[in-house]
Image: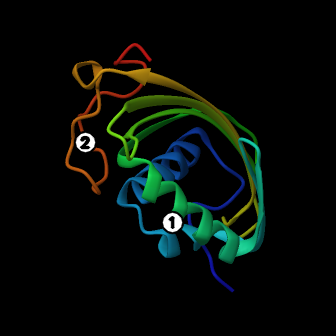
């Protein structure tokens, strides 16, 4: 059985670690590796899409990153309990037609005793931005560098 530390029950420190690990994984954009953080029967709601299990998660992420180019994400812990974490996040991406977007979202996560996410519920709003208004400028496909401002520091 796979274990994905940190595991519940979460503390402030371990919840922040879990959030940053998720952010780093999504910024690397490797769907198969991202899916390993979820239970094999993980349930997702992402906007108006409902997913069940690794195969659907991988397919969803492949399609997402094929249409949301130059994707860069910052997540921030909102609150937590023993086995649940709520985050707010923001990401910037470019459409296949060249339009830049900043997407604002909230997620609710629930974890099993091995630290794998068993459910994820995401609500997201997209706003068109000009390229000059972008705030996330680290190297594409890499985690956000240490010292790069977070959402609060960026006024988001």
Question: In the rendered structure, which disc, 1 or 2, sits on the residue that comes first in sequence?
Answer: 1
Locate residue 24, reporting x and y percent.
40, 54
Q: Is residue 18 visible?
A: yes
Residue matched to label 1: 62
Image quarter of the N terminus? bottom right
Question: In the displayed structure, would residue 56 be above or below residue 19?
Answer: below
Image quarter of the C terminus? top left
Question: In the displayed structure, would residue 19 be above or below residue 147?
Answer: below
Q: In this view of the protein, which residue sits in the foreground, 90 or 108?
A: 90
In the rendering, which numbered label is found on residue 83? Answer: none
Locate residue 143, reporting x and y percent.
31, 52
**How far, Cα to Cα, is label 1 from label 2?**
27 Å
Locate residue 144, reporting x and y percent.
30, 45
Residue matched to label 2: 146
Crowd rating for badge 2 (residues with CA inside 10 Å; few <14, some 14–19, many 20+) = few
Mark 1: secondary structure:
helix
Residue at coordinates 44% horizontally, 59% vertically from top-left?
Answer: 66
| Quarter of the figure with residue 25 | bottom left
Q: In this view of the protein, which residue sits in the foreground, 47 or 38?
A: 47
């Amino acid at each position: 059985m796979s274990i994905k530390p940190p595991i519940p029950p979460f503390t402030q420190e371990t919840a922040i670690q879990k959030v940053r690990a998720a952010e780093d994984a999504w910024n690397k954009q490797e769907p198969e590796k991202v899916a390993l953080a979820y239970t094999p029967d993980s349930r997702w709601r992402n906007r108006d899409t409902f997913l069940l299990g690794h195969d659907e998660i991988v397919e969803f992420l492949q399609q997402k990153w094929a249409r949301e180019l130059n994707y860069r994400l910052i997540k921030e812990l909102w609150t937590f309990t023993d086995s649940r974490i709520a985050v707010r996040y923001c990401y910037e991406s470019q459409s296949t037609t060249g339009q830049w977007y900043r997407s604002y979202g909230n997620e609710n996560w629930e974890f099993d005793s091995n630290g794998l996410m068993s459910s994820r519920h995401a609500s997201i709003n997209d706003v068109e931005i000009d390229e000059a208004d972008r705030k996330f400028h680290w190297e594409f496909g890499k985690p956000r560098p240490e010292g790069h401002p977070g959402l609060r520091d960026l006024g988001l």
